[in-house]
Image (tube, grey):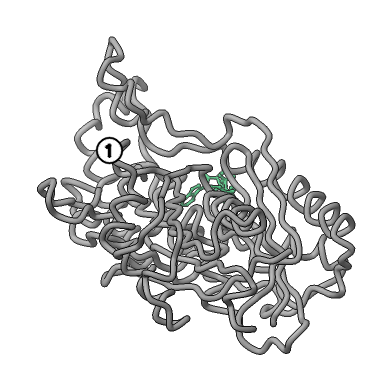
């Protein structure tokens, strides 16, 4: 294979929200809801809402805080969603701005000029609009020639985007591709839902993938990649372009992320561990050759389970780094943020795996070797 991950770049919002701050707002909402509906709750026609807890969130998920594009809106009990100021059509779109910042970081780390790049793939859970493509807007803002396109595969958006870039390089279609994953997820989250209000955070990550002929011996050679999908309704959002035409119009609540967290946990972990082990076998790789697993970041307990199955033993924290404490679940960006933050200490020839998993279900693997 001829593709090399040359560099990565990251953008985070300025503000983050701790579990305690989030829970205080949620519990104020619950108190108010229960007081306003006291009679109906007493009659049994409305169910009282239960408070959330920071302790539960950290233990069940590993999340301690999350970045957000608007802390005040998220923590305003009257609102409980980020406030997004509309932008004129001639201004850079919000998600494009986040993606461009991550892309500039990736280009700077590799010492590359936008003119060196042939294509831009914008891959993320949700696109800000349908067209023109977010990738084309970012391509224009960065001054990149060639072409760009959008794609979306929920939490596997990052790895599936990379596999597309790797394949374009392997087939000779491009020498240098920027994969940009802007995950502005907090507007998709129902901050009034106790089961999921803590899950997501905002981030953008970018990966510059080059042909080995132009990578100059720097970066990470791709030594194997794969994608798999299996339909499941256990993680779902019904948000889409038909909503405004549906009659009766769906409840606003029905447009948010929902999941059966327990089922996801039980079904996805074995599916992913099996995929990784099968992929390793088909690429001639062995678990003891993996110095580090940069796994999807949804839940620390999922990562422990998957890593234990892959390594076939207990492992050290730096063998499967977790960024959930700072970032929470950043959907398609998670495994790439983990890679960006924790790829130090590798000697030439040492190997690792970037692996995503999530809604769809979907799972993607990109095996890499340090040059
Ligand atoms: N605060 C306090 N308690 C809470 C709570 C909250 N915010 N949310 C749920 N609980 C309670 C439940 O009511 C339940 O109580 P009960 O046992 O008395 O009924 C208990 O905690 C366990 O709830 P459950 O939903 O089974 O928790 P969990 O251990 O499965 O953890 C998730 C929930 C969402 C963290 C976990 O299921 C998960 O991460 N799943 C996979 C997520 C994932 O990968 N998603 C992919 C999206 S990309």
From what the image shows, is residue 36 above or below residue 271? above
**SS for dot 1:** helix
Category of crowding for the residue at label 1, using alpha-carbon neighbours closer than 10 angstroms: few (below 14), some (14–19), many (at least 20): some
Q: Position of residue 126 (x, y in %)?
A: 39, 43
Q: Residue at x 45, y 45 (%)?
A: 125
Residue 356: where, in percent of width, then height? 62, 55
- Residue 263 figure quarter: top right
As drawn, 313 above or below 70: below
Q: Is residue 52 above or below residue 12?
A: above
Q: Which residue is mark 1?
A: 34
Residue 254 % position (x, y): 37, 28
Q: Residue at x 78, y 56 (%)?
A: 276
Q: Quadrant of the C terminus?
A: bottom right
Front in this rendered view, residue 116 or 221: 116
Q: Is residue 67 left or right of residue 294?
A: left
In this rendering, the count of numbered labels is 1
**Quarter-wise, where is residue 246 in the image?**
top left
* Quadrant in the picture for the N terminus: bottom right
Q: Position of residue 56 (x, y in %)?
A: 51, 58
**Camera sees residue 251:** yes
- Classify mark 1 as within 8 Å of ligand 1 or not, answering yes or no: no
Residue 199 appears in the figure: no
Q: Please, which residue is most extreme toward the top here?
A: 247
Nearest the camera: 313 or 133? 133
Left or right relative to 5: residue 31:
left
Q: Quadrant of residue 288?
A: bottom right
What residue is at 59 percent from the left and 46 percent from the top?
358
Please give left or right for residue 305 compared with residue 262 in the image.
right
């Amino acid at each position: 294979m001829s593709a090399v991950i040359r560099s990565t770049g990251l953008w985070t919002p300025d503000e983050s929200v701790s579990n305690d701050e989030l829970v205080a707002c949620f519990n104020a909402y619950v108190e108010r809801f229960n007081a306003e509906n006291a009679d109906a709750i007493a009659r049994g026609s409305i169910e009282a809402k239960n408070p959330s807890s920071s302790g539960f969130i950290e233990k069940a998920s590993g999340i301690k805080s999350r970045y957000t594009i608007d802390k005040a809106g998220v923590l305003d009990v009257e609102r409980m969603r980020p406030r997004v100021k509309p932008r004129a059509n001639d201004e850079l779109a919000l998600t494009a701005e986040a993606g461009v910042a991550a892309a500039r970081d990736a280009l700077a780390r590799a010492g590359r000029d936008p003119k060196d790049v042939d294509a831009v793939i914008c891959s993320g859970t949700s696109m800000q609009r349908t067209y023109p493509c977010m990738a084309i807007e970012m391509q224009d803002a960065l001054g990149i020639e060639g072409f760009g396109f959008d794609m979306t595969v929920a939490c596997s958006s990052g790895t599936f985007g990379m596999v597309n870039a790797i394949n374009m390089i392997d087939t000779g279609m491009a020498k240098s591709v920027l994969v940009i994953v802007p995950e502005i997820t907090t507007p998709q989250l129902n901050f009034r839902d106790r089961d999921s209000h803590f899950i997501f955070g905002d981030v953008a990550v970018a990966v510059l993938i080059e042909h080995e002929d132009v990578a100059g011996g720097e970066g990470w050679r791709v030594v194997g990649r794969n994608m798999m999908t299996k339909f499941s309704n256990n993680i779902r959002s019904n948000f889409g372009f038909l909503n405004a035409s549906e009659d009766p119009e769906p409840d606003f609540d029905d447009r948010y992320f929902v999941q059966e967290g327990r089922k996801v946990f039980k079904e996805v972990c074995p599916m992913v561990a099996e995929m990784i082990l099968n992929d390793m076998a088909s690429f001639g790789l062995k678990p003891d050759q993996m110095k580090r697993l940069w796994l999807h970041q949804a839940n620390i307990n999922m990562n422990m389970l998957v890593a234990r199955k892959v390594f076939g033993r207990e492992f050290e924290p730096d063998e499967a780094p977790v960024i959930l404490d700072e970032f929470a679940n950043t959907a398609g960006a998670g495994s790439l943020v983990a890679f960006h933050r924790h790829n130090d200490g590798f000697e030439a020839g040492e190997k690792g795996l970037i692996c995503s998993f999530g809604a769809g279900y979907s799972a993607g693997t990109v095996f890499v070797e340090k040059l």
